[in-house]
Amino acid sequence: MAPAPTLAERLDAAPSDSLSVADIATTTGLSESTVRRLAKEPGWPTEEPGDHREQRYPREAIAAWMRDNQATRINPDELPGADDDRVTLTEIASRTGRLRATVSRMPSTYRNSADPFPAADPLGTYSWGEVKAWLGRRSSRPGPRGTVEPPAPAAEPTTQPVLDKVTTAMIERLTGKGKEAVKTLVRKPEIAALSTKVGRLRVWPADTLLPLLWQLGYLPASGALGSEQRAVLVELGYLPASGKPTAEQRAVLREFGYDEQGSVEHRAWLRGPHRTATELATYYGVSLSAISKRIARAQEAGLPVPHPVDTEDGRRYDPKVFDAFWNPPVAD
């Protein structure tokens, strides 16, 4: 019996090169609500320009996305690795051929399911045998799904396995701060609340702590990262060991609060007029006292600080100069 066509193959055979949500649903057999949910996934093609009464997408781009990203029917017996392996979400993505962003959402998406995703240990690793069994159960349920070829044997890794947890040593490398300063930092209530203990080691979930560090200003919102910052993000799977980051990695980092080139809005801000201290505080989401205290600390340490200039409207700061002070890369 010939295997059922994949979702991508069904789309390849669609009669039109321009598809609406209803067209995609009819062609693939998915519900319209499922297609709308998929349209919110990372990398989903942008809708076609033009004065359409409904959203329309290029057929080839949708088929390519389905081919690369759609949840697939998996034969657990064809997946590599021993059942007693402990694996991270990144390793699960690698072994199954799925995007890390898709896999990383599985624990929360199926938390309240009758068949939840297997539980992680305190270090954020999973039993590969339990994951394979769960994937097999999901794949055996009825409904249109794609198919997947068993992933090719992976090359020997050149780095340590990707981690899902951040340690205090990694926080030191990310922030460029010493042990005592990091001890003070991790006692902040919003950071302390995220931590768990593994033996005597305190760890934090990477996908929760990193956005918080960016939000609090301990990591640069744009521009170059320091070598230690990059190294930690490589270890955590958010940057490649070499070459340029993937579109998925860029999207995740933007969600965390980092864009190497800066967002369009941020670049416009940097090119804009001089700003008052109040405007700066509002833009960076901090209080006026937080700005004055950081400037005072930098002055005490003999570091360069931004200086306001006198304008017709009062004393104001050059936004580009201030941003370089507020979001400096960690020195290599």
Image: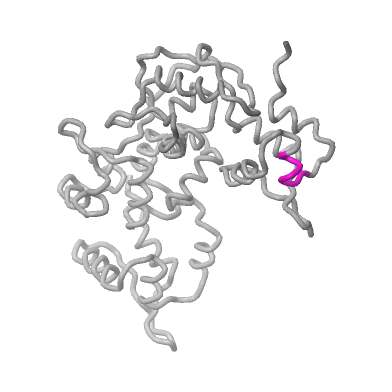
Q: Main secondary structure of the magenta part?
A: helix
- Is residue 312 placed above or below 186 in the rendered structure? below
Picture coordinates of residue 151 (x, y %)?
A: 55, 18
Picture coordinates of residue 55 (x, y %)?
A: 72, 52
The quadrant in which residue 179 appears is: top left
Q: Which residues are magenta?
A: 19-25
- Is residue 117 placed above or below 133 in the rendered structure? below
Quarter that holds the N terminus = top right
Residue 81 part of the magenta-drawn span = no
- Residue located at (77% from left, 58% from top): 53
Picture coordinates of residue 295 (x, y %)?
A: 27, 68
- Residue located at (74% from left, 54% from top): 54
The residue closer to the viewer here, 332 or 280, is 280
Quarter that holds the C terminus = top left
- Residue located at (43% from left, 25% from top): 91
The residue closer to the viewer here, 139 or 155, is 139
Picture coordinates of residue 101 (x, y %)?
A: 49, 37
- Is residue 39 placed above or below 2 in the rendered structure? below
The single residue placed furthest to the bottom in the displayed view is 312
Q: What colouring does the structure picture have?
A: one colour
Q: What is the total number of numbered labels drawn onto the structure image?
A: 0
The single residue placed furthest to the front in the displayed view is 114
Answer left or right for 325 relative to 153.
left
The quadrant in which residue 203 appears is: top left
- Residue located at (38% from left, 42% from top): 207
